[in-house]
Each structure stands twice: as C-alpha cells, then as structure tokens.
Amino acid sequence: MSGEQVLAPDAAPVAAAKRGQGFWALTLGSIGVVFGDIGTSPLYAMKEALAHAKGGASDLAVFGVVSLIFWALLLIVTLKYVVVVMRADNKGEGGTLALMALAQHAAGRRSGWILVLGICGAALFYGDGLITPAISVLSATEGLTLAPGVGKLFEPYVLPAAAVILTGLFLVQSRGTAAVGRFFGPITLVWFLTLAAMGMIHIVQEPSILKALSPTYAVRLLVGNGLLGFAILGSVFLVVTGAEALYADMGHFGKAPIRAGWLMVAFPCLMLNYLGQGALVLSDPSTAESPFFRMIPEMAYWPVMALTTAATVIASQAVITGAYSVTQQAVQLGLLPRIEIKRTSETVAGQIYVPAVNAFLLVGVVLLLFVFRNSSNLASAYGIAVTATMVVTVLLLFIVEQKLWKWPLAVSLAVVVPFLCIDLVFLGSNVLRIADGGWFPIAAGGAIVLVMWTWMKGARLLGDKTQRDSVPLEDLIATFNRRSPFRVPGTAIFLTSQADVAPVALMHNLKHNKVLHERNIMLTVQTSDRPRVPEAGRVHIETISPDFDRITVTYGFMEQPNLPRALSASRRQGLKFDVMATSFFLGRRSVVAGTGPGMPLWQDRLFIYLMKNAANPTDYFRIPPGRVVEMGAQVAI
C-alpha cells in the first residue's frame, strides 16, 4: 500500500527533478516504492484462488482463475487507477486523505459525510498495513519448506524466521531508510524481471494457457462455481492489493513515471508470472498447492529465495513508511492528536519516523504471525480493508467529479457506477471471510476510527468551552487603552487556536504576573486542504493595535510545521523581532471529565488520555525550548 512514502513522502516530483533525477530515474524509484506490495502478490494469490475453486487444479479452474486475475488487473489497476483515479490529484498529491481534502475544498464547506469517508479510508489503511508485512514475509519464509532436498528441515523455523525478519525491520526504522532505499528500485526491477522470466519458461512449455486471457473463462468459472464463486473472487482480489499505492504515491514520483512503471514493467511482468503459474499447474496439477515456488528452477532456487525475501521486505517497508506518512497527514488535518514525529534525514524532508506508530505496527504484525501462523490463514484476513478503501476512493471521486470538475451527472455516474459495482462485488466476496480472519483489519480500523472521532469531537467541545469562557481580544485591547498594565520590554508570542479571542496564556500572564510585554503577537497555526503552501503565502500579518499583531501561519497537510523558520519570513513583511530574544507563551490545558452532555464518560477518559500523551507543542512546532513559558489551566469537558 501507500508508502508514499518510502523514501521521500514529502518530496514532490519537481523537487526530485531539481536534484538531477530524470523521468527514468523517477520511474525506477516508483518501481521500488509503489509496486512492492502488488509485486509480491504472486507468492500467494494464485495458490489461494485455486484452493477455493471447485475442481481444484482442473483445466477450467486454472483457465478461469488466470482469466479473473488478468481482468482484475486490467479493470481495477489499469483502467480505474492508472487512467481515471490518478486524474484526481490534490496539487499533485494522492491518497485517501489528500482526496478527502480535495473533496472538502471542492464542496466549499466542511462536510460530515466527506470527513467520515476520509476517516474510514485512513483507518482501514492501518488495518491493511498490519497484514501486508506479515503475509508477504511469511509467504517468503514458507518457501524454505519447499527447498530442494532440505525443505523439511526448515519447517519448524518458518514462523520464527518471519518474526525475526519483521522485528529487525521495525527496529531499524529509527535509523532511516536513505542508505538502503536507493537500492529499492533496482532490486524490485530485478524481482519483476525474474517473475517474468520464470513465467515465460512455463508459458513456452504450455502455450495453451494464453487462452485464459479471454473473459469467457472467468465467466464460466464463476457460473460453474455458483456461490463458491464469491470465495474465489475474494482470493483473486489478492492480486490487486497494493493498487491504492499507485494513487497514494503519485506526488512523490509523478503520474507519468508511475504509469510508465505499471504499463511497461509491473503489469506485463506480473501477468507473465501468473500465466506461467497457470501453465505449470496445467502440466502438473500437484503444483497447485504452491505454484510460485514450484515454478522456480532447482538450480536457481536459493538465489530466487533471497530475492523473494528482499522483495517482501521492500514491500513491507513501503507500507510501514506509508503509515508514518498517513499519520503525519492525519495529525495536520486534526484527525489525531500531535504525535512525536522524528526526522531521520537532514537532507530529505520526507524521511520521518513515528515511534508510536512503529510500536503499534510491530506489536500488531507479530501478533498476527502467531495468531494466524501461515499465509493461507492470513489471506483470509487480507482484502476486506483494501476493498473498503477502494469503495471510499470511488465515492470521494464522484464528489470531485461533480463539485470540482463540474461533470454532468450522467457522465459522472457512467464513470463511477461500473467501478463501484466491481468494488462492491469484491467487497461482498471478502465479507464472507470475516469469520475466518477478516475481522482483524475491521477491528483495527474500527479502533482507529474511534480514536479519530473521539479526538475530533473532544477537540471541538474543548474549543467551544474555551470560546465561551474567553474574552474577545478586541475587548481586552480596549481595556488596555483605558488602563494599561505594567509593561515589560521585549516581544511575547502567544500561541492560540482561536485568533479572535484572548489566549489563556495571555490572561494568566496578566492575572498572575500582572505584566504586559511591549509587543504582543497572537500566533495561529492553520492547516490548508492543500498538500503544500507556497512560502510566499505562508505567513499573514494583521496589525490590531500599535502593540498587538496577529500572525497566521498556514501549512499544507503534507508539511511539518517549523515556526521559527516561518516567523523569520515575517521580517520580510516588516515585522522585525529577534526569535531568540522572544518569549513564546503556551497555554497548557489540563482536561478533566465533566458532567455535561458532551461525550460519555468512557469517551471523555479516552480523550483525556490522548491529550496527556500528545506531543509537546514546543517539539512539534520546533520552538526553541529555552524561549517557552507554559501557563496551565484546568478545563472540564
């Protein structure tokens, strides 16, 4: 999935080009980052689809499954994402949250339904992000049991080996991925070429498999299997998991390189491999239990195993870093509290590490390994989060078509309805697997939705309470004109989320210290529904009175706030002060559960827990710690 992510989640294609990267370099980079997840699907997708087909490895089952795989890749990935969805970019950025922000902007107001869709899409991503590393790496280590001559010796070590690889991957996240990241593209390119080569060997031996490209075999298989055809569709859908990454990573490589990477490398190589797996099973039905590993030539088994493991680790890295990027966007958009986000590179802005998310994913992935124990069981849990995310994407796309592109309703429906029907069919097929493991991503996604909803609702209630209890800033300044408090030299900057009311820190400074600085700046940080804000429009200064100014700093949802840097830009607009000689006043609110009609007690307590564990604003906004004064207040919600 989205790893928008792996190397430079915040680096736009233009910036990449300025660093000397050309079109083909971006294409190679996209192959390493964007297609890692979908590129490891051959390890398990064909095996699972054949296992659910009536007749197992019969000719109709093989032709039908390969036909379904081809048309799924063609319709969902190529036509839906590459041709249509990638047109809906938010200033070059893609992904569920970027599309949600674009839809909100197009609607011209903050729509509750659009917000709910965005929250659900983001939450489901985390559920999918837990399963991708587990099923990918476990599928690779299961190949050890099929090693020529020594496979049985490795059977007890499959699960521990996967756990060790994944644990090591999570433990090195804090060091960044820049050093190894430059090899992702070349390694994944070699992986795709290897997939194609292995497939062609068996296609040449059994060329009749090419008949599976006809949709008639897909229809015959589904009709012949009746209700069981739904289960087959659920397994076939495994071949398109990771398709959302094409859209989510669009801002980091550009549309053209991603499209070229898919049409010229990923799609043909994947299809050749699936055709090769089908040809192998046609010639030897006993290989249906694990067609991918059975198609590896014996003399090349161990090199291919090493390459397979590397490919699954790269796919896992893309999802892990994608979770970091989605978290950063969610925090900026106000869907989550401030979370500690560390930069792991001084030169690449997108290199970030989120300790809380890393710990959550590590625990979740290891738990998955030891609960489900093999890739077949994990396959039952896979898919439902992806299909639900795809439905969300189509619904948001419809809003963009209507509100932003101004398409006629008939045209919008003609584009959206076929895709929505396909997605709903696949979603229905995956719903059948809820009891077999599909409950896990739903539960994980539901928990994250609850956290996001609680945070937003609690923050709104807290803001309303603060608004009711606050003094309008204009009224306070008017009282200073009649009776001025004692003045002290210097500049005071008060951070506030509500620019028109007197900040809590200012009121406490007056009440307890009984002083007012010579110059006072009300500083508000806003998040735009655009991914990035030009430096020229980042800072807006408004003079309220001779000694009071209001500064609004705006960041895009893909940007990391840096207030000292933003304030230094205000000097060019005539507001001169020394940041290192300025005091930043922060109001720290201690929230307690109240008895009002706001939220249930358990939700109050969850919100309070989130507040207490939110990152310190000093660190989050990169304010010099030695210049910060915190003033507390207790608030009941």
Image: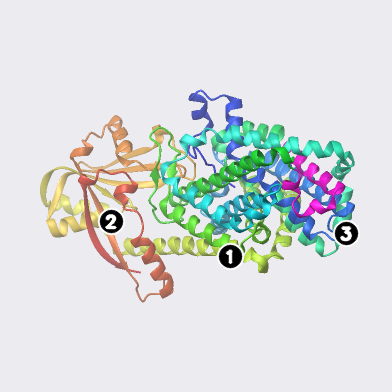
Circle 3: is it few (<14), some (14-19), or many (20+) Cα within 10 Å? few
Q: Residue at x 47, y 63 (%)?
A: 451
**Residue type beneath disc 1:** Val
Quadrant where the image shows the C terminus: bottom left
Q: State the predominant SS element of the stretch in magenta.
A: helix
Q: Which mark is residue 223?
A: 3
Does 136 appear above or below 535? Answer: below
- Closer mark to the observer between disc 1 and disc 2: 1
Q: Position of residue 589 (x, y in %)?
A: 29, 61
Q: Which residues are magenta?
A: 266-295
The residue that disc 1 covers is 371
Q: CA distance from mark 3 to mark 1?
A: 35 Å
- Residue 542 percent coordinates (x, y): 31, 41
Q: Residue 472 shows which numbered tag?
A: 2
- Under circle 1, the secondary element is helix
SS type, badge 3:
helix
Sooner in the amino-acid sequence: mark 1 or mark 2: 1
Q: In this view of the protein, which residue sits in the foreground, 116 or 343?
A: 343
Comes first in the chain, label 2 or label 3: 3
Image position, residue 499 (x, y; %)? 32, 50
- Please give the label number shown on residue 68: none
* Distance of label 1 from label 2 (alpha carbons): 56 Å
